[in-house]
Amino acid sequence: MRHIEIPREEDAPDAFKYWKRRHPGAKYYRFKDARVKRVLKDSLIARQKFLCCYCESRIDGENSHIEHIEPQMGGLSERSMDYSNMAASCIRDPKKNEPDFIPRTFEELVGSTLHCGHARGCNRVVSPYDERCERFFEYSFSGRVSVSRALSDPDEIALAEDSIEYLRLNVPSLVLLRRIAMFEAVKMLGDGIPADAVLGESGGKLPPFYPAEKTAVEKARGAAKPAAQEEVSEQFA
């Protein structure tokens, strides 16, 4: 999970602020204006560098939804219309996760197993707006996310475990894509591409699975380089 700066209310799109002024006190379930909602979601996607707030898969307006960091709780939350409580999460339509759904594209295949915001429900998970979020997790070349071994506080360990479970960060599609991203990052380094370019932003977008790629780059460049290369060879043999 990558730390994202908390959105400021004053930075919300003008169309969204105008809608709120016209509907004072409205809850999110009353927010039916598709045009304004699209503008709102696009602003969240852009500030997240086109990565899901939880799993860091590539997102755009067609494969994402507006997530509430503090859950809506069936309309009981008083923050459901706060820009500072919103983020963009992957998977637009959870109906596509029904047993009889047949994916027609690769993007639909990736999203055909429910995870991240739609899987979370109202369960408490690590927030991408928490400055500590990146230290809760670590990544292996297998593509799996696990609780960081650097954690010692029992409550933090439990929160990290719950986040992996409730967000379903280790569903097969995410593990596979994360694994590929890490392998490609190491391959690019081997081809002589500078680390800054491997992890760099392009057109306002960061590489998918950025924290996992960063881990791969650090292992390949650091003192553990031989071990990292051996691990990559074993995983992709």
Image (cartoon, rainbow, N blue to C red):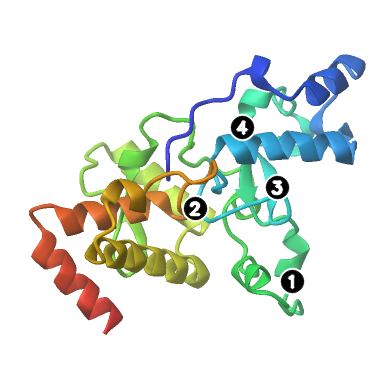
Question: Mark 2 to mark 3: distance in Å?
Answer: 14 Å
Q: Amino acid at mark 2?
A: Cys
The percent coordinates of residue 217 (x first, y second) are: 25, 55
Q: Is residue 102 above or below residue 191?
A: below
Residue on which the image places disc 4: 70
Residue on which the image places disc 1: 98
Residue on which the image places disc 3: 65
Q: Amino acid at mark 4?
A: Glu
Question: Mark 1 to mark 2: distance in Å?
Answer: 21 Å
Question: Mark 4 to mark 1: distance in Å?
Answer: 26 Å
Q: Is residue 146 above or below residue 98?
A: above
- Mark 4 surroundings within 10 Å by alpha-carbon count, few (fewer than 14), some (14 through 19), many (20 or more): some
Question: Mark 1 to mark 3: distance in Å?
Answer: 17 Å
Disc 2 or 3, which lies upstream in sequence?
Answer: 2
Given residues 37 and 126, the one toward you in this image is 37
Residue on which the image places disc 2: 55
- Horizontal side of 33 relative to 118 (left or right) equals right
The percent coordinates of residue 123 (x first, y second) are: 56, 44
The structure residue drawn at horizontal position 9% and vertical position 66%, both measured from the top left corner, is: 226
